[in-house]
Amino acid sequence: MIEISNVNFQYGTADIGALHNINLSVADGSCVLLCGESGCGKTTITRLLNGLTPHFYEGTLEGEITVNGLKVKEEELYIIASRVGSVFQNPRSQFFCLDTNSEVAFGCENMGLPEQEILKRREQAVRDLNMEKLMNRNIFRLSGGEKQKVACASVAAMQPEVLVLDEPTSNLDLDAIEDLKETLKLWKAQGKTIVIAEHRLYWLKEICDRVIYLKEGSVLFDISMEEFRTFPPERLEELGLRRMTTVAADFPEEPKTANLWKTTNLHGATEKSAITEAVEPGVQKQATLPAIEFHNYNFSYEKLPVLKVKDFSLPEGSIVAVTGHNGAGKSTFLRCMCGLEKKFKGQTKLHGKWQKPGQMLKECYMVMQDVNHQLFCETVEDEIRLGMNEAEEAKVPQVLKELDLSELTERHPMSLSGGQKQRVAIASALLADKSVLIFDEPTSGLDYRHMKQTADLFLHLKKYGKTTFIITHDPELIAMCCTHILHIEEGEVAEYYPLTAAHRERFLKQFSFQ
Amino acid sequence: MKNNAKLKGKDLINVGIYAAIYCVIMTAVAMLGFIPIMMPMLCVLVPLLGGIPMMLFMTKVKKFGMITIYSIIVGLFLWVTGMGYWPFIFGIVFGFIADLIAKSGNYKSSKKTIASYAVFSLIIFGNFVPLLINAEEYFLTRQSFGEAYITSLTEIMGNTWLAPLLAVSCLVCGIIGGFIGKAILKKHFVKAGIA
Amino acid sequence: MQGSLLQPDEKRTGITFDPRTKMFLLLTVAVFVLGGAGGKNVDLLAPMLCVLPVVLFLLAGKWKRAFTYVLIYAAAYLCFWYFGPRTTGIVNFLLLALCGILSRFLPGIMLGMYLIETTTVSEFTAAMSKMHVTDKITIPLSVMFRFFPTVADEFSSINAAMRMRDIRLGGKNVTKMIEYRLVPLMVCSAKIGEELNAAALTRGLGGEVRRTNVCKIGFHMQDILLFLIALSPYAAWIAGLVA
């Protein structure tokens, strides 16, 4: 039994994630979904249950929280830990041992259980979650989905009565989500109480029996899953929620790239003028656009071939969704294209010329999943000018304006929100005159509104004549803005097709939610 | 909350995390140490750059013991990577002193944390102790190295001024490094919301 | 780009030793090779300690490491023998200093490398707890070793980002370069560190109960043998002092 009564909470400094007058009670054995837009406070509620607020994330807390008789406010974290298990968003930051065997035992070791008991529990958790294959492995070499599974096993071995999951699927592919769904079903069958905060909702249809929607720190509605499932997609959009069903996918008859060159772009005057002339307005066909060609895309890590892509090509100016399982070789493919892998020897034809990896490094820019890696300066202004082509000076105000950064020029880049940081990175790429942009999971963990904003941004980038590659598992994003699918599995191109009406079925098959 | 002065899981994990960052930076700088001229420079460069992670770490320190443990495990890291046991001994001694200094400023005073870091930096000096201590005896047993080598090295290493020079360099650069760390803290980390 | 600190390969081959044996060996090398203690009696035993890392690397099936070590060590020595008498002045001094430092530090560093590459974090912490070291030390220590690969990963991501932005080391920009590298490194590491910290706490790390350790370590025949070898220079030392 979980009881939250009259809770008000405010983090030390920020307003985001604060809670106002929350009253909740969750019966034993039930499964509750917490949803709402980013910053609505759903994560904070999960933290109230596992004790991270107020014991780790400090702030001012009023009210009472009781989890199975335990008073969270007064209890020490390690006591709460043995009763409430937690699974988090980022698979990279929730393991402590370097091998899977120790990791599954880790929680129990901390509880100081006798050795025999730990071994017994570990064996059972491994059997329950069907993960014999993952044992005796170096965790750093596992894929995101596998890491998440190890995290679940480690929690399961502690045998908590309550499980709290905070956006556990943000970094997972569709199959890994199915896997997690099975784990949740098992926990439910074992009679555990589950509370889960999530953006992706479809996979919880059959799992959760209650849906709580939060807005700005207050509960807006608290209904049964049956009722929630009757909400039409438009209603969900209004609430800022992701879809419960497969995407609509209304694709055009012709590839969307065709009209690209009609609009003048920032760089249109220079090297691409030949292209613009060659393509007559109105009758543009894909065939007349220059193509990016990929030749000899083979690459090995420690003698293990990880990339063996047969030569292929795709039109410049496309927005390509690069899909495939966690660890299929998507990132390696794009790192090779960017010229980031020093041992890679393949060639890429861009602007009608064959380029070596070193030359591609000047043409490509990757916006990483953690954008913090690529922000170096003290102000946004300095940041976007760093490495800028002198000739682009005149474009600075325009780019700032179009990316909605004009107001932020004096801010420290690291103090911005995730979306703003992303835009700063894009602005610096535009001003450095890059022609290929790459995004690594730009919408992981975003709510509907932010995802739509990102999609609009990609569509907007089209007018600059950039070719865009997006590593993503997000069918909604793909349906909104991408022109092609590049599906990579086991280091090879499994499928490559334009997103046109003719290929609708194919897309739906790849991204069916069942 | 009870037992506020006691070190909790949170504090111990923070110690580990920031010690890791410090050690990585130290190791990156130490790579330069294989160029002989650069070796004494370690007493300059490591304290200078190490101030950045250390000052960030200091913002997480609120209880006695954290700095001591930090320097013990940094010393242990140096020992395990083959730099001898002196850094470990120095880690215990100077870590404890550094902790006391920072504590006297309630872990808030800028001056005290910088002083504390400078004392902590003596751990780098620990790496040189085996080269300085009984240098002559060491070279006596290694006649095979050749007369010229022994004279030139004992001249440098055995010189009475070298040991104090290196130690003072650690202290002074530690102070400068502390100021650099504070400046970066203000310039970046506070705004980035991690300090 | 994962560091190899305390995270050995998934399949370990060869003879393994208890971490405590390795640590004792490391101490011995630090005392006699690096520290040069022991006087004349140990003179004959010190080279044996220098050869030990080679033997250990070979026993662990790490041919490459053993070979590299022998190569560097031999090169340093040959260089010394050949060029030592044939050069003068500053060149001579630099050469001698390099060779001297290498020959003193290398065995220890190699042995450290051996320890780090053939011991898992769990084995290491198990050893620490068997030696009755408090959790207050073993917890930060294991977190530190867990976090090394993460910092290394972040470092290589930042490097990649810098290459894409074409930010290079220029003569006058050394301080800027250091700032550009260290600031994102610290911010990213601190953020991941915070997540890691939160996750560790929800698994009950740092409680007042004594941790169990399911990792099995213990002394075997090979450990006893190695201990005897490591004890011999101490014996010689004491014998020398008594005489």
Image (tube, helix red, strand yellow):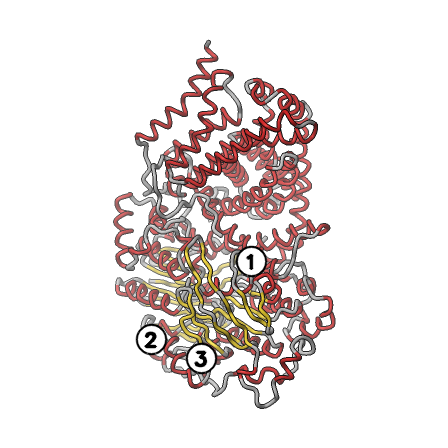
Find the distance from the CA under tag 1 to the CA under tag 2. Answer: 42 Å
Is residue A6 visible in the rendered structure shown here?
Answer: no
Give above or below for A89 relative to A95: below
Give above or below for A403 relative to A132: below
Using the image, name the chain to which the residue with label 3 belongs. A
Q: Is residue B119 left or right of residue C240?
A: right
The residue under label 3 is which amino acid type?
A: Leu
Q: Which residue is mark 2?
A: A514
Determine whether label 1 and label 3 are within 8 Å by CB. no
Q: Is residue B12 left or right of residue C171?
A: left
- Crowd band around label 1 with a 10 angstrom C-alpha radius: few (<14), some (14–19), many (20+): few
Q: Is residue A265 left or right of residue C149?
A: right
Q: Earlier in the sequence, mark 1 or mark 2?
A: 1
Using the image, name the chain to which the residue with label 1 belongs. A
Is residue B91 visible in the rendered structure shown here?
Answer: yes
Q: Earlier in the sequence, mark 1 or mark 3?
A: 1
Name the mark nearer the viewer: 2 or 3: 2
Using the image, name the chain to which the residue with label 2 belongs. A
Q: Which residue is mark 3?
A: A236
Determine whether label 2 and label 3 are within 8 Å by CB. no
> Do tags 2 and 3 sit on the same chain?
yes
- Crowd band around label 3 with a 10 angstrom C-alpha radius: few (<14), some (14–19), many (20+): some
Residue furthest to the top: C243
The residue under label 1 is which amino acid type?
A: Gly
Residue A512 falls in image quadrant: bottom left
Which of the numbered marks, if any, corresponds to residue A12?
1
Q: Secondary structure at mark 3?
A: helix
